[in-house]
Amino acid sequence: QVQLVESGGGLVQPGGSLRLSCAASGSIFSLYAMAWYRQAPGKQRELVAAISTGGNTNYADSVKGRFTISRDNAKNTLYLQMISLKPEDTAVYYCNAERFIAWNKYTYWGQGTQVTVSS
C-alpha cells in the first residue's frame, strides 16, 4: 500500500512557473514507477509525465520542453517542475504510483492538487 500526497499547486499567471511535489509513504518508493496525470474540467484524465524506477522519463507532447519530472528516492518524493505555463495547463494534477508484483499491477493515486493558469 502506498499513500501519495500532492502539494505545490496554485494560481499562476501565463508564462509563470510552479513545482509540484508528491510525498509517498507506506512502501518502498524506489520500487514504483511514478507519473503525473492531469484532468481538466469536462476532459478525461491524461498522462503528463512519467519516470521509471531507473530514471527514464516520458512526456506528453503538449508539455515537452516545459515540464520536467524527477524523483528523489531518498526523500520518497516525486516532483514536477513546470515552466512557461499556459492557460491550457489548468487542471487538477494527480500523482500516480505503479508496480507489478507476480503479474499483478498495483496502482495508487493521490488526491490531486489544483493548478490554475490565468491572468
Image (cartoon, rainbow, N blue to C red):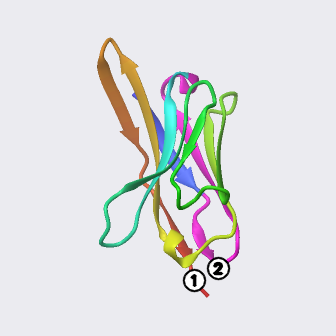
Does residue 113 appear left or right of residue 75 in this picture?
A: left
Q: Amino acid at mark 2?
A: Pro
Residue on which the image places disc 2: 14
Circle 2 Cα neighbour tier, 10 Å, few/some/many (<14 / 14–19 / ≥20): some
The relative height of residue 109 versus residue 94 in the rendered view (above or below) is above
Q: Quadrant of residue 112?
A: bottom left
Q: Is residue 38 left or right of residue 9?
A: left
User: Residue 86's image quarter?
Assistant: bottom right
Sequence-earlier tag: 2 or 1: 2
Instruction: For marks 2 and 1, give the CA distance.
Output: 6 Å
Question: Dots 2 and 1: beta carbons under 8 Å?
Answer: yes
Q: Which amino acid is tagged 1?
A: Ser
Q: Which residues are magenta?
A: 8-30
Circle 1 residue? 118
Q: Position of residue 76 (x, y in %)?
A: 62, 33
Q: Secondary structure at mark 2?
A: loop
